[in-house]
Image (cartoon, helix red, strand yellow):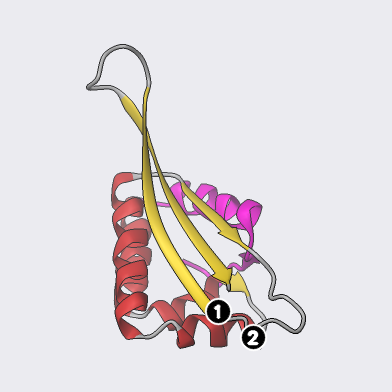
Amino acid sequence: MENQQFSFDGPGVRNWQNYLYAQHPIVIEEERIYIETDLLGWLPERFQLTAAQLQYAADLGSAAQDYFASQVAGAIALRIPILLEREPPEEGGGNSKTGSVTQRFTPMSSDTASYSRLLIIQFNYS
């Protein structure tokens, strides 16, 4: 995929997904593999990040990076919408960095086999 960049916020992540899913399946698979194998290389290539945001991702550590990468790659493989929620750092606070990934399953009807699925990525300071 060409070096198209998006804002690193909820609308930017939606725009990236819409752009990605409009591509050929081979391009989508290449993006998925790139995320899974080099999250820290992929992030600044796809999103407009400040140095502090990129450092935040690095500070999460390799275990968290691998987990985030596998969850995003899995969401792409299944075409699950991704929601990014992040808060700005607080002035004068400790600003410990935390991140989490959750999935929300919502029944679409009374048929329990039909549901919508959403991957929620959160970055917080505490």
**Lower sequence index among marks 2 and 1:** 1
Check residue 5 for magenta coloring: yes
Q: Position of residue 66 (x, y in %)?
A: 30, 75
**Quarter where residue 86 is shown:** bottom right
**Quarter where residue 108 is shown:** top left
Tag count: 2
Give the left or right position of residue 112, taking residue 53 as reference: left
Which of the two residues, 118 or 99, is positioned nearer the viewer here?
A: 99
Picture disc at residue 44: 1
On-image quarter of the C terminus: bottom right
Q: Hey, what amino acid is under mark 1?
A: Pro
Q: Hey, what amino acid is under mark 2?
A: Ala
In the image, what residue occupies the spot 54% across and 67% down? 123
Q: Position of residue 84 (x, y in %)?
A: 54, 56
Q: Position of residue 33 (x, y in %)?
A: 29, 69
Depicted 97 relative to depicted 110: above or below: below
Q: Secondary structure at mark 2?
A: helix
Picture disc at residue 52: 2
Check residue 63 for magenta coloring: no
Q: Position of residue 20 (x, y in %)?
A: 47, 54
The span shown in magenta is 1-24
Q: Secondary structure at mark 1?
A: helix
Which of the two residues, 21 or 42, is positioned nearer the viewer here?
A: 42
